Image (spheres, coloured by chain):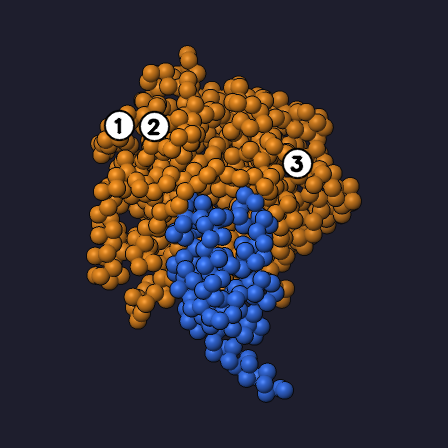
Amino acid sequence: MGPKLLSGLLSGLLAGAMCAGLAGSAGAQSPDVGWTSYTGDITGSRYKPLDQINAANFSKLEVAWRFKTDNIGNRPEYKLEGTPLEVGGVVYATAGSRRAVVALDAATGELLWVHGEKEGARGAAAPRQLSGRGPAYWSDGKEARILYVTPGYQLIALDAKTGQRVASFGNNGAVDLKADSDQAIKPDLTSGEIGWQSAPTVVGDKVLVGSSFREGFTPSTADNNKGTARAYDVHTGRKVWEFHTIPRKGEPGYETWLNGSAEHTGNTGVWTEITADPDAGLVYLPVESPTSDFYGGTRPGNNLYGNSLVAVDINTGKVKWFYQFIHHEIWDYDMSSAPLLMDITVGGKPIKAVVEPSKMGFLYVFDRITGKPVWPIPERKVPKGDVPGEWYAPTQPIPSKPAAYARTGVSESDLVDFTPDLHQKALALAKNYRIGPIYTPPVVSKAGGPLATLGLGPANGGTNWPGGSFNPQNHTVYTYACNSCLLAMGLVPPPAGMSDLPYVIGQAGQPVVMINAAGADQGADAPLAKRPPARGGGGGRLTVDGLPLIKPPYGTISAINLDTGTIQWQVAHGETPDYVRNHPALKGMALPRTGQTGFNIGTLLTKDLVIAGDADVTTTSDHPRGAMLRAYDQKTGKEVGSVLMPAGQSGSPMTYMIHGKQYIIVAVSGGNYSGEYICYTLPSE
Amino acid sequence: MRWIIAVVVALAALTGLTPAQTTSIWDGVYTDAQAARGELAFGAHCASCHGANLGGTGEAPALAGPQFLADFDGLSAGDLFDRIRTTMPQDNPGSLTRDQLADILAFLLKANGLPPGAKELDRRSEYLKAIGFSATKP
């Protein structure tokens, strides 16, 4: 697809749509409300105080329009994760295996323009392919631009009206984020491993971008490219600053990498969304773990700024404060969520806070100006491991408040217990593994046991990439958490030629399988005939008679008030899976809703509602095959309405108001259903 | 004629099949020989990601067990066939023949405990759409 495709033909239509939007806002009806950044704003809230769609009418929602993404790229995508933007009557979204940007009429869904980049071998080698999370929007009131990062790691600036590249930005509308880095990308710009799938954040006249890599389960080398976060001038595409997540010699924090290991360690990206407080002049960078995710023997020490929240000066990128959540991380917890910038009142004292949801199931709360924890986060002794060559941090910080909102470690009481027989089978299965509280380290996998350490939270659990949401009026965080995303953390030596690390993830007695990032080799630039590295067979799932080893609730939504630091309510989110509800061993049992085991669920907040869809489809006596988009009362957690979707929610919902009508868009995909944005609104009365 | 349609619709309602579906994956819609060919093809083209025991690895889901059956419950054998045909193997979609795909689908049915029959699965998705996919025996 050429970048100019459709642009010229349809720019006139777009201009018409924008005029209609302006005319709509001039009448007596409700004013237009847009969604101008990935999380609705640059504070991470996902909140708009709209209430045309409310508890009384949510179940009456009907489809306003659909946008199928199959043809945006040379193959359909089944993992559509985007959250669109809406500005002035136009919806902007990334879509398809090409990760093109589309502009759609916000009321009708009509395609206005589409822009994609063919990146050839560079796109095919990209660590994070497919449609990505979304674009960013900038305007000075006269000119408007759409900015996004391609799979091949280019920052592209487009004219929001036409979809054409902005020639004055970077090199004819593009900045090569590989070439314009302080580090020399290894081994070359085409195949060098670094990319990004998140949406940039625009703050004033700067656009902020991060970095990500392949999955760290089975990395080929410890000496990977290094993480980075950067600010670019939105007018010119000139780099304003670059933050090194792994300090260079002479920079503070370098000493936390013993034996000079900062030199040869990579990853430590900023793969999730970045937020900013322009009044405070601070940008908040959530930094992931260094190479590798489960073995850190090649990088002894605490490894700053791995697994830290780093507040940097918006103009210089210099560190103002930081907090390390995990010292010497070996669990793939990363920092998964956009930092939430909330103003709260604790003990009568107003606090400008930054709040970090996590895969660990803890909510970390700080004064966002000083970095001081709002409630103490004491260092606690954690279990030590015995993996040869590994370096273990003796303590980890554990928040004293709020209480954990998802399961953290694994104990026998977390195992399935629908019936005594199932629980006995679960105990017998668990005997093959090491279990324990949070931060129980991985083990070398042994055929006679332990096969692995079981963790709830590592890799997928707790709150993952969709992050949380908050209502700035009631100072409450609403966040989904996977409560049953179980991971077996066993280490084995890699087979010859796979990796220069002494250990990768695997299981004794089983062939070691190269585990790729989601979407690797699936993007539109990936050659159809490429063969992957030889792979072996696989291990079984952690199930008991086909039921999850971990008991329900499998996934939850929690409301956590940050004036008091207390969990106000928690509900199981998602219909009980068919294979659980219909399981022969559970026949006749009245099961409460179990929720579902998914990690792609983000929440949307309107004035009074929390809105989120089920991850998986179900078929019940109440509804045909499909997944429900649900609305909960923010005060009580009571479900007040739902709508049947054709597939599970795979990208977080957003909302906007134009021409006096409120709309909700959600991305769905999975199973047999390819990526689609569905736009809902109320029927015309 | 009208009463025949009414009976068909009523039967469909009783069996959980949609009107267009006249049979179910529980009715013996593949042969043992076809599933045996499918097992070989699965081993060559699918097992590297989905596991020789169909247990799944990494992001590749398990293809046997109650969760897999639930994922396609209420659809048709043709829907599963087309999902495989258009996207698999993930690194080289479109590389398998329709006969291979039908064989692999037969193997998946067998691995999930569905009974074999006397007739092979068709190689045309339009015809496979008439075979209802239900997680439990209708």
Instruction: Please say if A105 is above or below B108.
Output: above
Q: Answer yes or no: are tags 2 and 1 on the same subunit.
A: yes
Disc 1 crowd rating (10 Å Cα; few below 14, some 14-19, many 20+) is few
Q: Kindly identify which residue carries mark 3.
A: A118
Chain to which the residue tagged by mark 2 belongs: A
Residue A88 locus on image (x, y percent): 66, 45
Dot placed on the residue nearer the N-terminal end, 2 or 1: 1
Residue B108 locus on image (x, y percent): 45, 59
Instruction: Please say if A421 is above or below B93.
Output: below
Dot placed on the residue nearer the N-terminal end, 1 or 3: 3
CB under 8 Å between discs 2 and 1: yes
User: Nearer the observer, disc 1 or disc 3?
Assistant: 1
User: Nearer the observer, disc 3 or disc 2?
Assistant: 2
Q: Which amino acid does label 1 sit on?
A: Pro
Dot placed on the residue nearer the N-terminal end, 3 or 2: 3
Task: Name the side, left or right, on which A553 lies relative to A620.
Answer: left
Task: Name the side, left or right, on which A655 lies relative to A263.
Answer: right
Q: Which mark is residue A502?
A: 2
Q: Which residue is pictured at 63% across the width and 64% down the height?
A: A684
Q: Which residue is pictured at 38% across the width and 56% down the height?
A: A595
